[in-house]
Image (cartoon, helix red, strand yellow):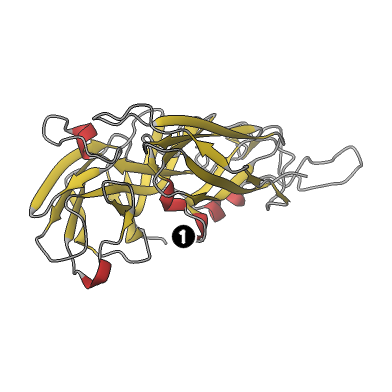
Amino acid sequence: MDKKATVGNAAPLMNISDYLQHFPKALVQDQKGQRYKSTVSGITIDDKPIGTGIDGQLLEVPKIVPAIGYLEAPNEIAQPAVPYTTALGLNTSISFSFQLRSNPYGPMMVKGFYVLAFDQNGAIQQLDQNGGGHTIEASIRITGQQIWQGHLALDRDDWYVFALPVEAGAGAQVDLTLTRFNVASALPDPVFLAFGLYGIQRHFIPPSFHIDSSLDPIRNQSTGFRVNTFPAQAAAGPPVVPSITTMNTRFDNRHPTIVDEMWFGGNESTFFNLRWEAGELCPQPIPTALFRYHRQGGQLPSPLLVNAPMTLNFDIYNWQATTITQSLNVASASFGY
């Protein structure tokens, strides 16, 4: 999409198709005498670091930024029964602000937002359940500009996509208002909302991608974890203190790698975050239910395109009083020979 709304001072971002054309074909000549495009010279193309866009910046990565009321306004909003969510009762309106990550993280292209609703036991709720009507309204402003306002009436889709992505500079302030109306429905009172923005973010630090990489992905680098049992909460609270279990997978190939899918199976009440050597998917935990098996296709908001070797580190947060069993799978591919 050529057009986009612009907020703050940020350079235009490029999609993955734009970036892939800047991957070098390979070495000019390998040890077997095979010849490739002679445009590759040293570790740069057109004086830009290998594996970056035309402006020399690092390849874009997916970013999910949860909007959690009680973390931003502890004196105004009580900590909810479900961690990492915002409680919303009947006939109530909650407004709070948060900031997108600043340096060393670059601008974020906000593509839309997600929302999940839980009851106090962590069970997923449909916001338009049993024809209950539009019960919740949301308003989003970025650096003072109205970006979205409307009712939340989710059935089988947890992601809202903006008609135009919004480019926001690092540190941009986001103002969120959630209003719940007294409409008869099957939703509990209160309902616990996991709400946040998602999109693409660019890091300022350029990579050092190897130049013997292909133009297109040629090798699967997918990983299926064994089924894991995560221990019960660390403390019952209030506030509840979740147990935290770290899982990781290592990609030992030496080529740029794209990760575009991950999915969780099993219990839907846990939360997680994902980190790697040069970045993070989310600054606070988000629901694993966003990436349920056979829901959303496990598709990330945008491909995670990073150098290799690399390690993906998952932190799984279980706030339930019992152990939880889940599986995790990551789908990716290598740009190497």
Single out the residue that lies furthest toward the bottom: 131
Q: Is residue 56 visible?
A: no
Residue 194 position within the rendered picture, expressed as x and y whole percent measured from the top left: 30, 47
- Label 1 crowd bin: few (<14), some (14–19), many (20+), radius 10 Å: some
Q: Is residue 93 visible?
A: yes
Say if 238 sits above or below 305 in the image: above
Single out the residue that lies furthest toward the right: 32
Residue 244 position within the rendered picture, expressed as x and y whole percent measured from the top left: 44, 30
Q: Quadrant of the C terminus?
A: top right
Residue 136 position within the rendered picture, expressed as x and y whole percent measured from the top left: 18, 59
Hey, what amino acid is under mark 1? Gln
Instruction: Please name the residue shown 84% across and 46% down the image.
Output: 35
The quarter of the picture where residue 182 lies is bottom left
Residue 216 position within the rendered picture, expressed as x and y whole percent measured from the top left: 68, 53
For disc 1, the marked residue is 296
Q: In this image, 86 relative to 23: left or right? A: left
Q: In this image, 151 relative to 34: left or right? A: left
Instruction: Please name the residue shown 68% across and 51% down the image.
Output: 217
In front: 116, or 325?
A: 325
Instruction: Please name the residue shown 49% across and 31% down the image.
Output: 245
Question: What kind of element bears circle 1?
Answer: helix
Please state the total of marks drawn on the protein image: 1
Single out the residue that lies furthest toward the front: 322
In front: 57, or 94?
A: 94
Say if 328 sits above or below 274 in the image: below
In front: 56, or 185?
A: 185
